Image (cartoon, rainbow, N blue to C red):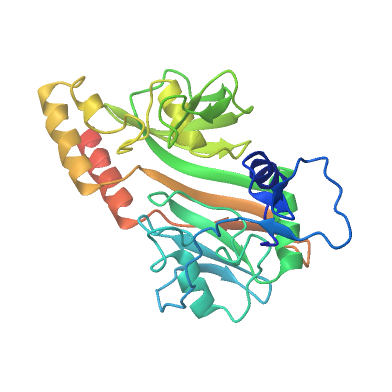
Amino acid sequence: MPTQITRNQVQKLLKSGKIRADNKPVKPSHLVEPGEHIIVEYELPYSPTLYAENIALDIVYEDDYMIVVNKPAGLIVHPGAGNATGTLVNALIYHCEHLSNDNGLLRPGIVHRLDKDTSGLLISAKDNSIHGNLRSQFSKRTIEKYYYALVWGTFDEDRGDIDAPIGRHPKNRKKFTVIDSGRPSLTRYEVLERFEFCTLVRVKLETGRTHQIRVHMTHVNHPVFGDPYYGGRNSKIITLNMRNRQLAAKLLGLMNRQALHARRLILKHPITNEVMDLRAPIHEDYEQVLAILREESQG
């Protein structure tokens, strides 16, 4: 039986009769007797071979213990079904002699993750003790995480909080939504620049839910610009006047993803305990969109 099988998986196998003693299905209360022949029918999960690939990395910081990269949009963090190659992990195992394996064999070094089409800072650990330290900092929320998000619409206030629970969407299990049964989630935002039909905000995550910024911004009717899954593309164009419709369509053509960038991380080095303030510049497509908006706002 695989060493990583969970208690919940064992319960399901018992209920389906796939665990047998002397070829008879057993109950969870069954006590194994000496000499019994135990059979477990278990389908191994998909496990692609990891390949080291010489994929260029934009390294923001590296030492013997950890590596921090500025991940480009479009780069998947780790392999999975249908994505055995071309991921950040493939690049890391080529670049690094050692990586942690605390997060499973398919995610060496990976302490946290970013969505495929979100760019910015991502930390990887080079051994398990470093991985544990960084994971603890994340779980205790002592790491400060800041993002730059270009969102639709304008704000009257300069800053605000979005405090709303996030969980799986009841009808689309690939999406998340604000829902009463969700986990507590808190997003703080501050306006950096105002444009005619969108706003650049700096977002601080106080919790780390999947798609948190994208879900929360959509919840307050300010979806992330370009976001194809949470209402950040064409559905917003129809609300604009003709001139701005044309401009928005042009900008969406330049940026075929959500305008979301993990800009800054503040953490303690896992060995020296010194405070690290790491920052990653915005990528070219995002910067080009901002440059056009700034030019239009001055014209």
The answer, for residue 55, to whether it is visible in the render is yes
The image shows a total of numbered marks equal to 0
The answer, for residue 299, to whether it is visible in the render is no
- Which residue, as the protein is rendered here, is positioned at the far bottom? 97
Residue at x 22% of width, y 41% of height = 252
Residue 112 place in picture, x, y as percent: 59, 53
Residue at x 12% of width, y 33% of height = 246
Residue 65 place in picture, x, y as percent: 68, 72
Q: Based on the displayed image, in which of its 4 quarters is residue 127 positioned? A: bottom right
Left or right: residue 18 versus residue 247 is right
Left or right: residue 253 versus residue 63 is left
**The N terminus, quarter of image:** bottom right
Residue at x 62% of width, y 41% of height = 16
**The C terminus, quarter of image:** top left
Q: Nearer the viewer, residue 209 or 270?
A: 209
Residue 95 place in picture, x, y as percent: 51, 79
Residue at x 63% of width, y 36% of height = 207
Residue 13 place in picture, x, y as percent: 65, 46
Left or right: residue 297 versus residue 92 is left
Q: Nearer the viewer, residue 4 or 248?
A: 4
- Which residue, as the protein is rendered here, is positioned at the far right? 34
Q: Based on the displayed image, in which of its 4 quarters is residue 201 positioned? A: top left
Is 210 rendered above or below residue 180? below
